[in-house]
Amino acid sequence: MSKISKAARVARMSQTQKDLALCRASLRGDAAVVRILLAAGADAHTDNDYAIRAAITLGHDEVVRELQAAMEATRG
């Protein structure tokens, strides 16, 4: 699936679906999907910061960096 069609699909998702997809992408270490989901409004803090905790535990460093950047941006 191309990046454009992934982004179009994400645009039709509910907030809950985006957040769940973010957690799943973090578990897989899929930084490209994590970036798309965060850009579409997925909540980096969903489920008690599950996505970043999973990425740290599994050693997905690029995903961790993406999530940290999103968290810092929302810290205000």
Image (spheres, rainbow, N blue to C red):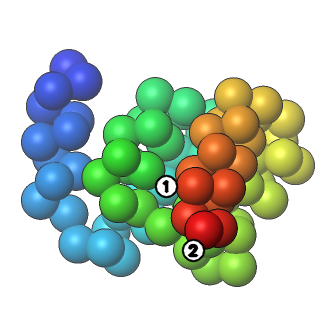
Q: Is residue 4 above or below residue 27?
A: above
Q: Are marks 1 and 2 in contact (CB under 8 Å)?
A: yes
Q: Quadrant of the C terminus?
A: bottom right
Mark found first going from the N terminus, 1 or 2: 1
Q: Is residue 21 above or below residue 75?
A: above
Of the pair 11 and 54, the residue shown nearer to us: 11
> Three-letter amino acid code at disc 1?
Leu
Question: Residue at horizontal 45%, vertical 38%?
Answer: 35
On the image, numbered disc 2 is attached to which residue?
Answer: 46
Where residue 55 appears, x then y in whole percent?
A: 75, 46
Question: Residue at horizontal 64%, vertical 45%?
Answer: 69
Label 2 element class: helix
Of the pair 19 and 27, the residue shown nearer to us: 19
Q: Quadrant of the N terminus?
A: top left
**Residue 42: quarter of image:** bottom left
Q: Circle 1: is it few (<14), some (14-19), or many (20+) Cα within 10 Å?
A: many
Label 1 element class: helix
The circle drawn on residue 38 is none
Where residue 40 appears, x then y in whole percent?
A: 30, 52
On the image, numbered disc 1 is attached to which residue?
Answer: 22
Of the pair 29 and 4, the residue shown nearer to us: 4
Question: Residue at horizontal 62%, vertical 39%?
Answer: 66
Mark 1–mark 2 Cα distance, whole angstroms, equals 9 Å
Where residue 48 appears, x then y in whole percent?
A: 70, 79
**Residue 64: quarter of image:** top right
> Three-letter amino acid code at disc 2?
Thr
In this orientation, does residue 55 appear? yes
Q: Is residue 74 above or below residue 29?
A: below
Question: Residue at horizontal 69%, vertical 28%?
Answer: 62
